[in-house]
Image (cartoon, rainbow, N blue to C red):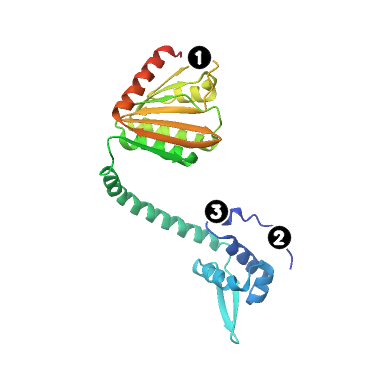
Amino acid sequence: MRRYFVDTKILEEIGLTPGEIKVYLALIGLGETSTGPIVQESNVSVSKVYNILDRLAKKGLASHIVRGNVKYFKAADPWLLLSYLKEKEARIKAQEIQLERIIPELQLKQNSVVTEETAQVFDGLRGIQTARERTLNIMKKGDEMWIIGIARTPYDRLTTYFNEYHKRRVKKGIRCKYIYNDYARKPFGEHSAAFPLSEVKYTPEGMVTHAWIEIYADTVTIGLNFKQSFSVVIQNQDVADSFRNYARLLWQMAKK
């Protein structure tokens, strides 16, 4: 059988398992066939191949017929992968709607057990993002947040998120004051200053940090992106007010 190279990464991204991909590609190359050639071509064990074929059938990507008490399997037309993806997108959209309905209930339940003093740690770059999202959940139009410092360590995967976040912040009418390290003038400082409701100042040259501080409402978030990434969120009005006083003092000392 003639072999062709297929980049299977996209198939994994739309939800097919490695085993499903192997079996599907084997079916594509073999045409209508019994399980023996599928096992040989896909290098998937006999004990697993029937289960995988059943999953592919449920996804609309394989079918079978019976001849002389023997099952013969066939791959669906590759164009049906697009239909599978669209069906998956429709399910995700429906799940999103359902999730939006229960989030207020979950927040009420969460708020019912929040004490006056709480501290939480959010791990990884996704955790940094989760911690930042909290600002939009609790702040109102006209509120002000402070961002002090910026990690020297690159976090390229979050750049797109931060851009999108600040657009939503501006749309909600939340003001932001940045006190960046001097090395962040380009591109971060100039880019941040271009957003409406934003002011930027800089600390003296030579200050290098891998962490930053966010102050808003009754909360202080300390973020770190060096060797490992995480955010520590401290919810306490007195702590937030103290950090806010420090921020105002730094603002007077910082330069535009």
Number of residue marks? 3
| Residue closer to the observer: 195 or 127 | 127
Question: Residue 196's mark?
Answer: none
The residue wearing badge 1 is 204
Residue at 44% across, 35% down? 231
Q: Amino acid at mark 1?
A: Pro
Q: Which residue, as the protein is rendered here, is positioned at the far right?
A: 2
- Regarding mark 1 in the picture, which secondary structure is present there? loop
Badge 1 density bin: few <14, some 14–19, many ≥20, Cα 10 Å: few
Q: Residues within 10 Å of mark 2 (few under 14, many from 20)?
A: few
Q: Position of residue 150 (x, y in %)?
A: 49, 26
Q: Residue at x 68, y 68 (%)?
A: 41
Q: Residues within 10 Å of mark 3 (few under 14, many from 20)?
A: few
Residue at the (49%, 32%) spot, across then down: 224
CB within 8 Å, label 1 to label 3: no
Label 3 SS: helix
Place of residue 161 in the rendered image (x, y in percent of width and height, measured from the top left): 47, 37
Select label 1 or label 3 by which is in front. 1
Q: Earlier in the sequence, mark 3 or mark 2?
A: 2
Nearest to the observer: residue 83 or residue 198: 198
Residue marked by disc 2 = 4
Front tag of 1 and 2:
1
Instruction: Looking at the picture, tell me which residue is in the foreground, 102 or 64.
Output: 102
Name the quadrant of the N terminus. bottom right
For the residues labelled 1 and 2, say whether their Cβ atoms are less than 8 Å apart.
no
Residue 167 percent across, percent down from the top left? 41, 33
Q: Residue 162, position in %: x, y?
A: 46, 34
The kind of residue tagged 2 is: Tyr
Mark 1 / mark 2, whichever is N-terminal: 2
Q: Which residue is mark 3?
A: 13
